[in-house]
Amino acid sequence: MLTYTYFGKDDFRLTEKPMPELKRDTDALVKITLSSICTSDLHIMHGSVGRAVPGITVGHEAVGIVAETGADVKNVKKGDRVSVNVETFCGECWYCRRGYVNNCISPFGGWALGCRIDGMQAEYVRVPFADTALTVIPENVSDRQALLAGDILATGFWAAKISEIKKDDSVLVIGAGPTGVCCALSALLKEPRRVYICDVDESRLGFVKEHYPGIAALRSDEVEERLRAECPLKGADIVIEAAGTDKSFRLAWEAARPNAVVSIVAMYDAPQVLPLPEMYGKNLTFKTGGVDGSDAKEILELISAGKLDVSALITHTFPLSEASAAYELFASRSDGVMKIALDCEGKNDFLFRGGA
Ligand SMILES: [Zn+2]
Ligand SMILES: [Zn+2]
């Protein structure tokens, strides 16, 4: 079967691999319908994900059809249309029992798919812990609507959850890329006073204004002035940093009012410095890390109920066989690209674009 595989730094290639097989009774095989390209894939490509194992198929966000299940799998069956979670988790260890599934202690737990074991930019994938990693997609939710539920929408949903957003809060999301938009839309579900999103990229702000007018889109250089003018306490009550640059990291604590919660969900290519003498007395609460992706069912129910729809983020679609061109476009951020879906069904050897 066709896969897109990580061989080493700056070396991803289309490669034929044997069909995966079930290894444990808790595994399932999924025939991938759509997979997506994530910024984390670019981080692997750039060599900044130390855990990534050369030789693995990349891709950690997908929808597909269950093709086979192990003897102990109870929650899904052959033929089910499912969303695959970025994280696979045992559901039983100390961390899993508290919802901290990113730190599941199982060797197959946490972010394994497309990082430590073969992932989903492929025709088929073996999914460990299928009962927790796979979620049946409600009938009225399309594959495109469900595609981002396992990773970036899960990240946005989790970011909004850990940020302790209250009704009269002003929330600032830094970064109007796909993850930032998912954070902002998830923050809106908490019905705060206002949700702002900022970016240095005008085309991304334009995208937000066009598709999600409920979010106030600002240029990063106007954030301080606008928050000072519009927020009762002259700064954001909650900041979610989803951009991942040195400047955005600094803006995150600068734009926060004293005693704010600052959630850092971005992944950086370089270490960041907290200038504690400058921040002294601001008494911020920082939350950091990678998504605890255990809310797929709730997310898919919100999509089904019409309360959440991020499918507009999928601006381009390529067949899996054109993965290299898709990565090039995604990395270049040209042509208004937000998220790219890879059609993995193997029938399409043509290149098509747009929302269809
Ligand atoms: Zn990702
Ligand atoms: Zn666990």
Image (cartoon, rainbow, N blue to C red):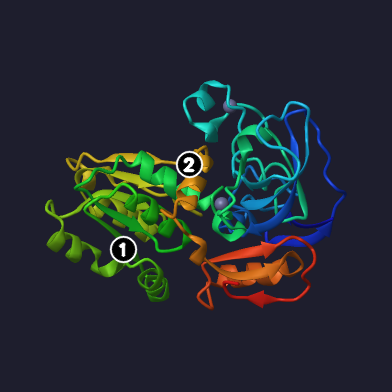
Quadrant placement of the N terminus: bottom right
- Secondary structure beneath disc 2? helix
Give the left or right position of residue 211, taking residue 337 as reference.
Answer: left
Give the left or right position of residue 255, taking residue 95 as reference.
Answer: left
Give the left or right position of residue 238, taking residue 13 as reference.
Answer: left
Residue 298, numbered label: 2
Residue at coordinates 11% horizontally, 53% vertically from top-left?
232
Quadrant placement of the C terminus: bottom right
Q: How packed is label 1: few (under 14 Cα within 10 Å), some, or many (20 or more)? A: some
Residue 36, visible in the rendered structure: yes
Asked where in the image residue 174 lies, by quadrant, the reply is bottom left
**Picture layout, residue 318 above or below residue 273:** below
Residue at coordinates 33% horizontally, 64% vertically from top-left?
198
Residue at coordinates 72% horizontally, 42% vertically from top-left?
117
Mark positioned earlier in the residue sequence (1 or 2): 1
Residue 8, visible in the rendered structure: no
Give the image location of residue 14, x and y in percent: 78, 62
The reply to whether discs 1 and 2 touch (Cβ–Cβ < 8 Å) is no
- From the image, tell me which residue sits under label 1: 214
Give the image location of residue 57, x and y in percent: 74, 51
State the residue in front, 210 or 95: 210
Q: How packed is label 2: few (under 14 Cα within 10 Å), some, or many (20 or more)? A: few
Give the image location of residue 34, x and y in percent: 67, 58
- Secondary structure beneath disc 1? loop
Q: Residue furthest right?
A: 18
Q: Residue furthest front?
A: 140
Q: Name the amino acid type tagged 1.
A: Gly
Residue at coordinates 31% horizontally, 63% vertically from top-left?
214
Q: Name the amino acid type tagged 2.
A: Glu
